[in-house]
Image (spheres, rainbow, N blue to C red):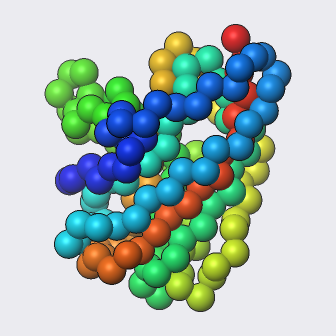
Amino acid sequence: MTIHRNEYGNRRKAPINTGGCGVVIAVPFDFTLTEDYVASTDIIEFGVVPAGCKVIDVDGAGNGWGTGLTAAVGYMSGKVGADTNDDGSPRTCGNQFFPALDIDPGNASMTVANKMTQTVDYDNDRSIGAIISANQTAGGETLRLIVKYMAVR
């Protein structure tokens, strides 16, 4: 398993804070596949929810991926930018936002996830990741999430 990252996933870009409790902001997170290959076991780490913030909802879309492909999108285990969890085990990616986001090339519209009610670790920044449903070769494929979150403390 490989973890592919954008500027948020590799910590070159800091997560955007809301500036105060109850303030909702929308942040676009984009990932463009530039590597030669992504396997169905690989994780794309491409968004960060700051500590003390709760996700309100998520819009998602993909472009250029293979016909019939989907992406499971959710919170990742471990620390942002880390290759493994603290105990050395491989990081994982959930599907809290989208169990199967349609990233078929014929679907250019944004898909809206239901309101988020998951309990998360509010004391630490949390990575958002995706796992593509099948192996894919590089060709400029993109994923985009627009994540709306607010500070809760």
Q: Quadrant of residue 112?
A: bottom right
Residue 140 appears anywhere in the view: yes
Residue 134's place in the image compared with 52, above or below, is below
Q: Is residue 116 left or right of residue 99?
A: right
The one of 23 and 65 positioned closer to us in this rendering: 23
Q: Residue at x 48, y 24 (%)?
A: 125
The one of 109 and 88 positioned closer to us in this rendering: 109
Residue 48 drawn at (x, y percent) = 50, 36
Q: Quadrant of the C terminus?
A: top right
Q: Is residue 51 left or right of residue 24?
A: left
Q: Residue at x 32, y 39 (%)?
A: 10
Residue 100 appears anywhere in the view: no
Residue 84 drawn at (x, y percent) = 22, 33
Q: Quadrant of residue 55?
A: top right
Residue 12's place in the image compared with 61, above or below, is above
The one of 10 and 128 positioned closer to us in this rendering: 10
Q: Residue at x 69, y 68 (%)?
A: 110
Q: Residue at x 50, y 64 (%)?
A: 143
For the view shown, which residue lies furthest in the right direction? 22
Q: Is residue 68 left or right of residue 20?
A: left
Residue 83 drawn at (x, y percent) = 22, 37
Residue 109's place in the image compared with 85, above or below, is below
Residue 6 drawn at (x, y percent) = 37, 50
Q: Is residue 104 left or right of residue 119?
A: left
Residue 43's place in the image compared with 116, above or below, is below
